[in-house]
Image (tube, grey):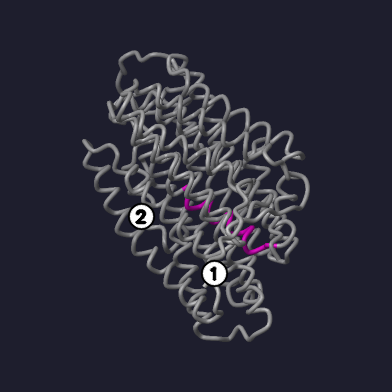
């Protein structure tokens, strides 16, 4: 029998090749050259920037509706995946800038750390580009395994080890649901291709019990990955225990990747089952927004507060998921870009203030910060205002886009619940600002260097702050990009 080798279109995954190559270079350099800790961070950052340039400009399809595919259609490069990859790479680049000082300060091995960051990013990029359930699953596994390691990377801290173990156990359990759901869909439709599943369900009854169970298991699996209620239990402990830069990374890139795959599967493969899953997602969105914001109100640890905030923001994104259509999916893309900038920016300040061993993580530690470190306090206030959705920040425009999509799709009640939750969130975000500017510290803190003495971290803060203001004040160009990046497989 003749073996037919399919033609591989390398242009569809140039950026993935760059990321993979730099991850391998870093691992080899760590073993053979033993460079300084900062040097590997700079190499990783150069790799991410190179992949970002390749993703945006080689070949350029932004602004037109075009799709490239490879591996016999298992992998696609369209504007949707390209935009999400841009989000991943921006998030990873900012995380690396935050990590350079942190890794040296905590005396952690840099090689494996930066390699794992790049491999996790590679997994996210595979998830966004997968046009088949199998590449999506492989991307999830590559991302998840890297994150399990990174969560427990502060080996000397018991809380980090506990967080890694909890994340691994619960993550593996959720992955089982996801894989079983994919298997049931394959058994019912005879294909794992997203286009094939769409075609089968469009031509056959969707009341097949196997298909319905498979869909429900996918909701559970993806719900865990995006930290949606009631699959959110791991989030506060993992965010608190992981190294601060990794918490920033997990709250942005992996969440965006999970939403990229979630939307690809449900909006591209299962639109024929819209009536079956839309109300499930509606209720999950309501619970996720409400539970996240209400529990965040009583948190004293700023990392746990932002963990519950992250849960609530997943609920806002699910509003766009429910809305779908010509506004919902672009709203998800715009919001994930805005959320990446404002959340990583906030964690950059938290990383700096935390100091060695992350000893300052309670809100009390931020009392008087506005007078002791005015630049850091102003930056943190900006990011918190954006997370709260206060104009003229990116967070306001993102929420406006999502809630407008819900109203346009006829989900007025869901939009109202989202707005009310945003109002609730203002309280716990302002609680930090009040502590920084309106309270006197209980104890005198030893003098610490200014933010300028951490130049790479300061650069991450500047980039994030610029992005938050740019998206909030001049959003039109980015709205045009996300509208061109809508799902177009079907």
Dot 1: element: loop
Examine the rendering and report whether any part of residue 306 can be seen: no
Residue furthest front in the image: 1
Q: Earlier in the sequence, mark 1 or mark 2?
A: 1
Hey, which quadrant is residue 436 in on the image?
top left
The image's mark for residue 234 is 2
The image's mark for residue 284 is none
Magenta stretch, residue numbers: 309-324
* Residue on which the image places disc 1: 2
For this view, does 486 lie left or right of residue 252? right
Q: Quadrant of the C terminus?
A: bottom right
Whether residues under marks 1 and 2 lie with C-beta atoms below 8 angstroms apart, the answer is: no
Q: Between marks 1 and 2, how big is the CA–CA gap?
A: 50 Å
Examine the rendering and report whether any part of residue 149 can be seen: yes
Residue found at x 76% / y 39%: 477
Hey, which quadrant is residue 7 in on the image?
bottom right
Residue 147 location (% of width, % of height) = 38, 47
For this view, does 20 lie left or right of residue 488? left
Q: Nearer the viewer, residue 4 or 238?
A: 4
For this view, does 351 lie left or right of residue 421? left
Prevailing secondary structure of the magenta residues: helix
Residue found at x 51% / y 76%: 186
Q: Nearer the viewer, residue 116 or 338?
A: 116
Residue 102 location (% of width, % of height) = 36, 27
Residue 239 location (% of width, % of height) = 37, 45
Q: Nearer the viewer, residue 72 or 302?
A: 72
């Amino acid at each position: 029998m003749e073996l037919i080798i399919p033609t591989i279109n390398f242009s569809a995954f140039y950026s993935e090749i760059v990321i993979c190559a730099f991850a391998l270079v870093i691992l080899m350099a760590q073993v053979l050259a033993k460079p300084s800790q900062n040097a590997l961070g700079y190499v990783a950052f150069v790799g991410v920037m190179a992949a970002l340039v390749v993703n945006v400009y080689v070949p350029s399809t932004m602004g037109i509706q075009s799709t490239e595919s490879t591996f016999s259609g298992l992998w696609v490069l369209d504007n949707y995946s390209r935009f999400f990859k841009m989000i991943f790479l921006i998030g990873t680049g900012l995380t690396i800038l935050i990590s350079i000082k942190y890794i040296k300060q905590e005396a952690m091995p840099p090689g494996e750390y930066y390699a794992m960051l790049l491999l996790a990013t590679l997994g996210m990029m595979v998830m966004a580009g997968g046009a088949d359930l199998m590449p999506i699953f492989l991307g999830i596994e590559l991302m998840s395994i890297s994150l399990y390691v990174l969560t427990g990377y502060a080996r000397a801290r018991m809380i980090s080890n506990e967080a890694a173990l909890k994340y691994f156990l619960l993550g593996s359990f959720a992955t089982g649901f996801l894989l079983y759901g994919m298997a049931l869909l394959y058994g019912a439709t005879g294909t794992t291709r997203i286009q094939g599943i769409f075609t089968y369900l469009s031509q056959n009854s969707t009341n097949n019990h196997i298909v319905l169970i498979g869909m429900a298991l996918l909701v559970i699996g993806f719900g865990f990955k995006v930290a949606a209620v009631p699959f959110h239990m791991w989030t506060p402990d993992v965010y608190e225990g992981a190294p601060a830069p990794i918490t920033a990374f997990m709250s942005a890139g992996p969440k965006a990747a999970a939403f990229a795959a979630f939307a690809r599967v449900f909006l591209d493969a299962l639109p024929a089952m819209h009536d079956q899953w839309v109300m499930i997602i509606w209720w999950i969105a309501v619970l996720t927004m409400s539970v996240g914001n209400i529990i965040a109100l009583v948190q004293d640890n700023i990392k746990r507060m932002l963990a519950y905030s992250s849960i609530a923001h997943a609920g806002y994104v699910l509003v766009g998921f429910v809305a779908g259509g010509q506004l919902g999916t672009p709203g998800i893309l715009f919001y994930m870009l805005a959320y990446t900038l404002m959340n990583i920016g906030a964690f950059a300040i938290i990383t700096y203030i935390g100091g060695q061993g992350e000893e300052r993580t309670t809100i009390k530690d931020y009392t008087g910060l506005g007078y002791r470190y005015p630049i850091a306090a102003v930056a943190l206030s900006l990011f918190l205002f954006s997370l709260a959705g206060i104009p003229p920040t990116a967070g306001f425009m993102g929420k406006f886009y999502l809630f407008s999509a819900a109203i346009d799709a006829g989900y007025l009640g869901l939009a109202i619940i989202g707005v009310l939750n945003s109002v609730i969130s203002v309280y716990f975000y302002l609680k930090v600002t009040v502590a920084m500017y309106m309270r006197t510290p209980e104890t005198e803190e030893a003098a610490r260097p200014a933010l300028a003495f951490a130049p790479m971290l300061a650069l991450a803060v500047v980039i994030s702050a610029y992005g938050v203001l740019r998206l909030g004040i001049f959003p039109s160009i980015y709205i045009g990009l996300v509208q061109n990046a809508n799902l177009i497989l079907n």
